[in-house]
Image (cartoon, grey):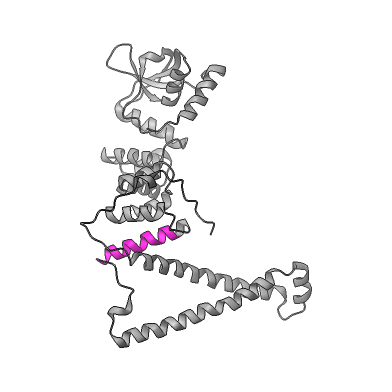
Amino acid sequence: MVAKKPALRNIPVSKIEPDPDQPRKQFTEEELAELAQSMQKIGQLQPVAVRKTKTPGRYRLVVGERRWRAAQQGGIDELAAMVWEMDDEAAFIAQVAENVNRQDMTPMEEANAYQRLAAAGWEVEAIAELFGKSQPYIGWRIDLLGLVDEAQELVAKSQLQVGVAWYVCKLSPDQQRRFLVKWARAEFSSARDAEAFAKACKAAEEQGGFFRLDESEHDEEAQEKVVAERKKVVSKIDRLATAGEILQELSQLNPVDLARLLAGADGGVGAYRQRVDHLKTLAGKVSAKLRKAQAIAASATVEIDPAVVVEMPAELIDLTPMPAAAE
């Protein structure tokens, strides 16, 4: 890796060419138009970085392709450029650093950039130190390359959240596509529900298949036991309605009235707040288990069949992203 002190020059835009290996691939027309207008009015505020090509008088961009594109749109003939002497690896690292630190790259562009360095012999620890990231962060980004193309496209468009996508990338391609159909149809009420479903599918894959929830396959005694246990659990959950009504009534009380009424009670206001907080904690635990149960129930209806390939409907690809529910 070689990089010497650069020289600042004014170079005709026509003599500068883009780098085909530039890790950032996506540039929106809106941002280019805004930058072109800005450069026309106030000029170029920051030089681009280039390096010489084998053709005399020609240069290849290292960083600043957005400025170069905007200059072309704005009819600007020359760009101030720092001319570096560097090899391909040094140029690539500079490009990744420029875009990662400014958050211009999509998660998939980041993933490909880190993977390219890893393939060149860089250790994850060294990549993390180079770009000021944690080692798990680098590993998680690289993991995203396990997504099927349809999922990668949604992540690149910010239509599938990175946190959810990481769980999805652990699934087989067929199961990923099944997940994408459910995601696009908004069958998950939150990002956490989507993650739970992906985890349940992964657990089922690791077990070699999805278990059956239908007790009709059991013998008569087992069926009766399941029915009895179901009645008990459903009865307990139904009784929560009464607790909900009580909490609803208490929530309508004025804090001043609560202070006046409970100040003289055993333990004071704090003791009653602890009781309610304890219920809140328990309710959170039950909700988390029900979320997992819901995911398991949903995944139990999905069969793993290597011969089946579920195509992602084209009309679902461009749906707007589903916001994560506040939890």
Q: Is residue 219 visible?
A: yes
Q: Position of residue 107 (x, y in %)?
A: 40, 42
Magenta stretch secondary structure, dominant: helix
Which region is colored magenta? 193-209
209 vs 23, nearest the viewer: 209
Q: Position of residue 51 (x, y in %)?
A: 35, 20
Residue farthest toward the left in the current orientation of the protein: 307
Q: Position of residue 120 (x, y in %)?
A: 26, 37
Magenta region includes residue 321 = no
In the picture, measured across the screen, residue 43 lies left or right of residue 109, that is right
In the picture, measured across the screen, residue 18 lies left or right of residue 244, that is left
Residue occupying the point 42% across, 67% down: 294
Residue occupying the point 33% across, 45% down: 150
Q: Tally the marks.
A: 0
Residue occupying the point 74% across, 67% down: 255
Q: Position of residue 5 (x, y in %)?
A: 40, 21
Q: Quadrant of the N terminus?
A: top left
150 vs 70, nearest the viewer: 150
Q: Is residue 172 visible?
A: no
284 in relation to 169, above or below: below
In the picture, measured across the screen, residue 282 lies left or right of residue 48, that is right
Task: Please tell me in which quadrant of the rendered image residue 175 appears.
Answer: bottom left
271 in relation to 162, above or below: below
